Image (cartoon, helix red, strand yellow):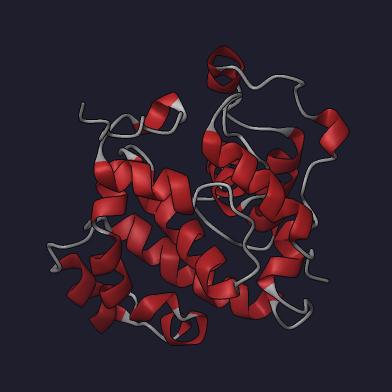
Amino acid sequence: MNQDKTPPAPQRCGWCGTLEDYCHYHDHEWGFPVDDDRRLFEKLCLEGFQAGLSWLTILRKREAFRRAFANFDIDKMARFGERDIQRLLGDAGIVRHRGKIEAAINNAQRARELLESESSLAAYFWRFEPDPASRPDRLTPEVLRAMTTSPEATALSKDLKRRGWRFVGPTTMYALMQAMGLVNDHQEGCAAGEAVRRARKAFKVPK
């Protein structure tokens, strides 16, 4: 008798469905703690571009965004001028929205300012990590659908806006916190959620 059976697919959060690119992002990136400034800044920019669109759209354009925006190198982006804006508006591989493009460049400039007083972007962002005691006991799909922001995301948004950043509303900042591991919003029973918990336990918060 042939005992060769395909192993069952791991249990995942409902939002990623069965699409290969979504599942890979969910299993290997979403929620795992990040302390790399370039990755944090990239995700912040991409969250801004996502406004009004699906994350799948942005995920599938991510490599084109990286090419267009100098791999989200903060210093290089901060020097972008009108010629770069026109180049980006003509790039069919990205989201060609002048306001969002200008916001990304502005935010690179504001990031350079922030780094004059902070050891890293990561150290700044991780100060807004919620107290674990404030988190829900059970992350069911119903609970997660209702969690579009948090007091910490609102505080982060307010502080960034005070510093002149754009496209950094509370909902956008909560999505950033979910993606970069400041919160673990994998639903109860999700296999990746346990991997994220182990990664967070081993993670050293940047200072």
- Horizontal side, residue 114 vs residue 99: left or right: right
Q: Residue at 54% across / 42% down in the picture?
A: 175
- Outermost residue toward the top in this view: 142
Q: Nearer the viewer, residue 1 or 135?
A: 1
Location of residue 189 with respect to 156 vertically, above or below: above
Position of residue 100 measured from the top left corner of the image (x, y, whole percent): 36, 57
Drawn side of residue 49 relative to residue 124, left or right: left
Q: Residue visible at 58% across and 18% down?
A: 146
Residue 86 horizontal/vertical position (percent): 20, 74
Q: x, y percentage for residue 32?
A: 59, 53
**The N terminus is located in which quarter?**
top left
Q: Quadrant of residue 137?
A: top right
Give x and y (percent) for residue 10: 43, 33
At x 53% / y 17%, what residue is drawn? 141
Residue 56's place in the image compared with 62, above or below, is above
Residue 87 versus residue 103 in the image, above or below = below
From the viewer's perspective, tell me whether residue 63 is left or right of residue 138.
left
Quadrant assignment for the C terminus: bottom right
